[in-house]
Image (cartoon, helix red, strand yellow):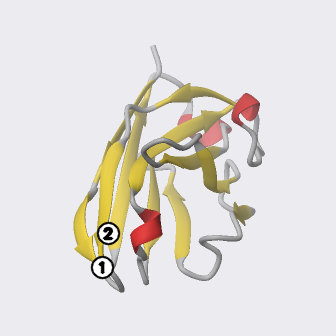
Amino acid sequence: QVQLVESGGGLVQAGGSLRLSCAASGRTFSSYAMGWFRQAPGKEREFVAAISWNGDSTVYADSVKGRFTISRDNAKNTVYLQMNSLKPEDTAVYCCASGKAYYSGSHNYQYDYWGQGTQVTVSS
């Protein structure tokens, strides 16, 4: 059974930073792309970032490009999201997801396992 457990969320002031982690188990982590998505209250889930199986390819939503960095450590079965220059509009529940292939993009259907999420709140 695949499990994804996020951590690292919290309350931060605008302009601050947070680093999210997602620990994976139950499948060969290094064989699949990973992604981060977020959902704000009253809004649909939206794509944030994705990384290929070996980290050689990354893709970001325009809204976070230049501020967020996705990375992975296959030896630790963990994917990270470093979030800098946070804005109040970044407030959301952030979930990691495991892709169906070596490379996955920004669409929900490209992922087959999801974590429960971690809350990120950015105050103004």
- Amino acid marked by disc 2: Val
Q: Position of residue 94 (x, y in %)?
A: 43, 48
Residue at the front extreme of this rendering: 42
Q: How many marks?
A: 2
Q: Is residue 29 left or right of residue 108?
A: left
Residue topped by disc 1? 124
The answer to which image quadrant residue 28 occupies is: top right
Judged from the image, the secondary structure of the residue bearing numbered disc 2 is strand
Label 1 element class: loop
Image marks 1 and 2: residues in contact by CB distance under 8 Å: yes
- Residue kind at label 1, given as amino acid type: Ser
Query: Which residue occupies 64% across, 70% down?
Result: 63
Residue at the spot 37% in from the left edge and 39% down from the top edge: 117
Residue 107: where, in percent of width, then height? 75, 40
- Extreme residue toward the left, this view: 11
Mark 1 Cα-neighbour bin, 10 Å: few <14, some 14–19, many ≥20: few
Tell me, for residue 122, which label it has, or none: 2
- Of 119 and 25, the residue lying toward us: 119
Tell which tag, 1 or 2, sits nearer the viewer.
1
Identified at 65% across, 75% down, the residue is 65
Residue 92's mark? none
Q: Residue, x 75% and y 62% (percent of image)? A: 57
The crowding category of the residue bearing disc 2, from other C-alpha atoms within 10 Å (few below 14, some 14 to 19, many at least 20), is: many
Q: Quadrant of the C terminus?
A: bottom left
Q: CA distance from mark 1 to mark 2?
A: 7 Å
Q: Quadrant of the N terminus?
A: top left
Query: Residue 39: percent from the left, percent from the top?
Result: 49, 45
Q: Is 64 left or right of 8, judged from the image as shown?
A: right
Q: Position of residue 104 (x, y in %)?
A: 76, 44
